Image: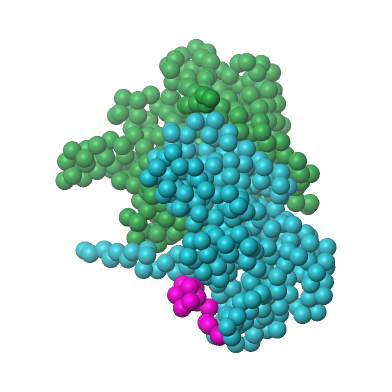
Chain colours: A cyan, B green
């Protein structure tokens, strides 16, 4: 008897998730949305509950040679809160699973939890439970967050409509540039441990990498402005990838206007210094944890003076066309692998 | 500057959890119970929400040489559902985080999810989300479950009262005996790979190890009988350890009557064969995932004919005394390390 073996790499992460999710059709009447959005949605009666989980693994998601444990604890909570924000919801309770190899001391665990605590305070969530285990291979952090959203305010990925305005919070590509800098300094350090890291004037991009902030402030400001996004997703894998999710799940197309992309000056300068294209970083960099969302044209005036929000394009009724209009007047199709490859 | 380093082993798992939880006092009005029970409790308005998380790591929690992936997937869900059962609640939605090293194929992932699916069907929960990541070191499964319980039916650990009757579901020590058998067969196999495992007549104890079943059936039967336990905990670390949690958190003592301990015949025979004490296995074996709970004496008649429930002792007003009354008429103090050490 031969047993067939298919490598996971042949499916890719999204292919694997698709394969898994096909086997699971929600059966309970209170499951409103299962796999396929930033968070699951449960009917709690008066409002919706939200549930999301993320794993961070040493050697895969972070490198402890330059990632302080306190920042890592903060990030582990923040990236999950970002998934709740992407549903236009408010995070409430969090549980943390921890795998620790014996190279971690009690003091190291204290540092990690100091960061978790700072994030709990910043995002107003309660740590309510967890699980702690030894680990044979480095540090592992698994976080799940429970949140809530009024039923009429929920924002899914699949509900963008043609002619909606495409918006993004904050700026793009900075976390990616921070990572490039940290990687460069690590290489310098490995060659010459006496070298001091050259990060002066780069504090912003480094912080964007080390301490990503879920944009709950933007969720609250949308509420104050009386705007419910027609669709929303958080930018964890890069604008291009997230926009393609929004478009394919909503059955719409999009046009992104390059000159409207929010790119911070430090991102631009760092990219130039490292011979990288800042627009590529903005489109494909990842780990921005900004909110990408669509609004009705009628709501534009409510947000146009908000300095945290950029209006970067619009949705169309051509699902097959997700386009970048460049400054030079060209139109490039945006693809998952990256628009990178054709830049 | 010297940095102090304290090994985690000096605190132990419970010491570490205590240290962590001291830093986290719930701040939100809808957080009813944070760290310290089987699941966190949230006020959802009409009822309570429950949230719990558990990590299973290869090489720490399971050995893939004898643990089929399908069973492992089942177990990962079941042990979390058991935490919801221990609050007298009903599980609703589950999210699964997965870390996979490249030695796992798509077919292996399919097997794992087949087990997860079987558990979702058995316990009537929906898989609603997750996170999949590569792993540098073997397989890791992190599961979080959301559940619900009517406010008047919740069962905490800290609410047992003197003179309550101490009850346990199912039987004890069988999962531990199953593990001993599997470990023995693994050693035999390592010496002589042609040997067939000798597990005939041991199907029950092996299954108790490989496919633990959360006792949702008992939760439903308690409801049908109109009984709300005064306190409840699930038996994951052995009866002794869990009973000490119940007693210390409730501020009561307990007397356990040895001859009332439910021990299956296969457990007894396997223990004899392996020169182990079946009572030690029952008291300290662990991984039974049975429910240990207390009831009012007035409720005894409602449960006395239920074959799934054993009445193994009673609670007292002497918090410092948690006692085993043996068949031989002796009284031994039950300790966390085990009553084992003094048997």
In this picture, residue B19 sits left or right of residue B270? right
**Residue at left offset 71%, top offset 44%:** A121
* Magenta residues (range): A330-343
Whether A187 is drawn above or below A31: the answer is above
**Residue at left offset 35%, top offset 25%:** B276
In this picture, residue B65 sits left or right of residue A173? left
**Residue at left offset 66%, top offset 46%:** A119
Whether A340 is drawn above or below A20: the answer is below
Measured from the top left, where is residue A23 in percent x and y? 48, 67
Q: Is residue A242 visible?
A: no
Measured from the top left, where is residue B14 in percent x and y? 55, 29
The C terminus of chain B lies in which quarter of the figure?
top left
Q: Considering depth in this image, is B285 or B80 the residue closer to the camera?
A: B80
In this picture, residue B308 sits left or right of residue A42? left
Q: Considering depth in this image, is A242 or B96 the residue closer to the camera?
A: A242
- Residue most extreme to the top: B330
Give yes or no for residue B98 being in the magenta stretch.
no
Q: For residue A217, what is the image quadrant?
A: bottom right
Q: For residue A68, what is the image quadrant?
A: top right
Whether B132 is drawn above or below A227: the answer is above
Q: Is residue A293 visible?
A: yes
């Amino acid at each position: 008897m031969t047993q067939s073996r298919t490598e996971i790499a042949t499916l890719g992460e999204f292919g694997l998730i698709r394969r898994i999710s096909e086997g699971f059709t929600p059966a309970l009447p209170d499951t409103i949305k299962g796999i396929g959005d930033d968070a699951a949605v449960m009917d709690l009666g008066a409002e919706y509950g939200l549930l999301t989980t993320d794993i961070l693994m040493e050697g895969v998601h972070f490198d402890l040679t330059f990632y302080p444990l306190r920042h890592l604890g903060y990030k582990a909570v923040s990236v999950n809160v970002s998934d709740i924000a992407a549903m236009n919801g408010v995070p409430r309770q969090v549980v943390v699973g921890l795998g620790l190899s014996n190279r971690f001391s009690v003091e190291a665990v204290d540092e990690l939890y100091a960061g978790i605590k700072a994030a709990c305070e910043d995002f107003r969530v309660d740590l309510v439970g967890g699980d702690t285990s030894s680990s044979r291979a480095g540090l592992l952090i698994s976080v799940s967050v429970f949140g809530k959203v009024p039923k009429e305010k929920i924002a899914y990925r699949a509900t963008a409509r043609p002619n909606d305005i495409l918006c993004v919070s904050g700026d793009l590509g900075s976390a990616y540039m921070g990572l490039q800098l940290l990687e460069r300094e690590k290489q310098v350090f490995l060659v010459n441990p006496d070298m001091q890291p050259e990060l002066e004037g780069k504090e912003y991009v480094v912080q964007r990498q080390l301490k990503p902030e879920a944009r709950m402030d933007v969720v609250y400001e949308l509420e104050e402005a009386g705007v419910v996004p027609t669709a929303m997703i958080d930018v964890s894998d890069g604008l291009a990838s997230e926009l393609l999710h929004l478009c394919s799940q909503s059955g719409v197309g999009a046009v992104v206007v390059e000159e409207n992309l929010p790119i911070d000056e430090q991102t631009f300068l760092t990219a130039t210094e490292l011979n990288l294209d800042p627009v590529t970083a903005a489109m494909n960099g990842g780990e921005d944890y900004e909110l990408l969302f669509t609004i009705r044209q009628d709501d534009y005036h409510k947000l146009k003076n908000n300095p945290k929000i950029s209006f970067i394009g619009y949705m169309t009724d051509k699902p097959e066309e997700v386009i970048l209009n460049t400054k030079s007047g060209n139109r490039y199709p945006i693809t998952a692998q990256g628009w990178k490859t054709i830049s």
